[in-house]
Structures are given as structure tokens and as C-alpha cells.
Image (cartoon, rainbow, N blue to C red):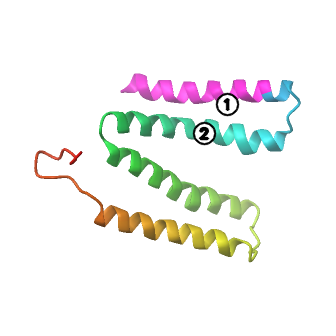
């Protein structure tokens, strides 16, 4: 387990560092690098963890990983960023909030009404 965790951290760092180097050599602006490569590189460990969990038929871990990551990013990262540089409210955000709330409601409905696990030792129906 320690080996896998270390591999995720080192692999993510290697991807980000080398991707930044290649992008800078190609003359890509730092804003584009920050919006794409850094975002993808910091999400790779979560993506790999979710893929491995799904392959091992532990879809609950994969779903929990995605939900937990989103909650963490919305509450902690946005909160700390807002303390450093306050985010002014804009009415354009209303559409984003509506999509966020709609997605959350859909997820809750799907979690509680979808096919659950049966009584055969916790194995899924499929």
C-alpha cells in the first residue's frame, strides 16, 4: 500500500513537472499551462485511484473519491482562495450554481434509488 501511494505521488509530480517543461518549450502561455496541465496532473492520483477501485469492483470507493474531491475543492480551495483574494459575486454564477445543485440532487436520487447491493455478501447485482 505504501508503494502504491508513493507511486501516485511521484508519478503525479513527474507528469506535472515534465508537462510544464514541454509546454514551456513549445511556447504555451503560463495561464494555459495552469488551466490544463496543472489541473490534469493534480487530478491524476484521484483518477488512477478511482480506476483501480472500479476494476476491483469497489465502485463505492471510486464514487466517494470523486464526491470527496469535489467537496474538498469547493469548500477548502475556494474558501482559502477567497480569503487571499475575495471573489466578487457575478450573476453569471447563477447558471453554475443551478448546474451544481441539479447535479447534486441527481446524485442523491441516484444513490438512494439505484440498484443497491444484494444479500449475497455485498456483491453487486451485475
Q: Which residue is mark 1?
A: 16
State if disc 2 and disc 1 touch (CB < 8 Å). yes
Q: Residue furthest right?
A: 27
Q: Write the residue at 39% across / 51% down.
A: 64
Q: Nearer the viewer, residue 74 or 94?
A: 94
Instruction: Identify the secondary structure beneath mark 2.
Output: helix
Residue that protrudes farthest toward the left in the picture: 120
**x and y, in percent, of residue 66 in the image:** 47, 50
Looking at the image, residue 21 sits to the left or right of residue 77; the answer is right
Q: Which of the 4 image quarters holds residue 121?
A: top left
State how many labels appear: 2
Residue range corresponding to the magenta coloring: 1-22
Mark 1 Cα shell of 10 Å, populated few (<14), some (14-19), many (≥20): some
Q: Is residue 13 left or right of residue 17?
A: left
Q: Quadrant of residue 23?
A: top right
Q: Is residue 82 left or right of residue 126?
A: right
Query: Which residue is found at the position 36% from the left and 27% from the top?
Result: 1
Point 36% across, 63% down: residue: 110
SS assignment at label 1? helix
Which sits in the foreground, 109 or 84? 109
Identify the mark nearer the N-term, 1 or 2: 1
Q: Is 88 covered by the magenta stretch?
A: no
Instruction: Give the x, y percent position of residue 126.
Output: 24, 45
> Disc 2 marks which residue?
42
Above or below residue 86? Residue 32 is: above
Amino acid at each position: 500500500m505504501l508503494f502504491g501511494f508513493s507511486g501516485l505521488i511521484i508519478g503525479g509530480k513527474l507528469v506535472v513537472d515534465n508537462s510544464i517543461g514541454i509546454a514551456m518549450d513549445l511556447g504555451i502561455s503560463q495561464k494555459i499551462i495552469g488551466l490544463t496541465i496543472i489541473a490534469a496532473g493534480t487530478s491524476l492520483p484521484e483518477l488512477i485511484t478511482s480506476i483501480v477501485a472500479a476494476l476491483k469492483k469497489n465502485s463505492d470507493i471510486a464514487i466517494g473519491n470523486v464526491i470527496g474531491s469535489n467537496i474538498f475543492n469547493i469548500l477548502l480551495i475556494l474558501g482559502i482562495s477567497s480569503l487571499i483574494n475575495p471573489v466578487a459575486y457575478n450573476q453569471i454564477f447563477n447558471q453554475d450554481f443551478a448546474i451544481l445543485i441539479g447535479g447534486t440532487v441527481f446524485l442523491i436520487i441516484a444513490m438512494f434509488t439505484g440498484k443497491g447491493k444484494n444479500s449475497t455478501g455485498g456483491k453487486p447485482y451485475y
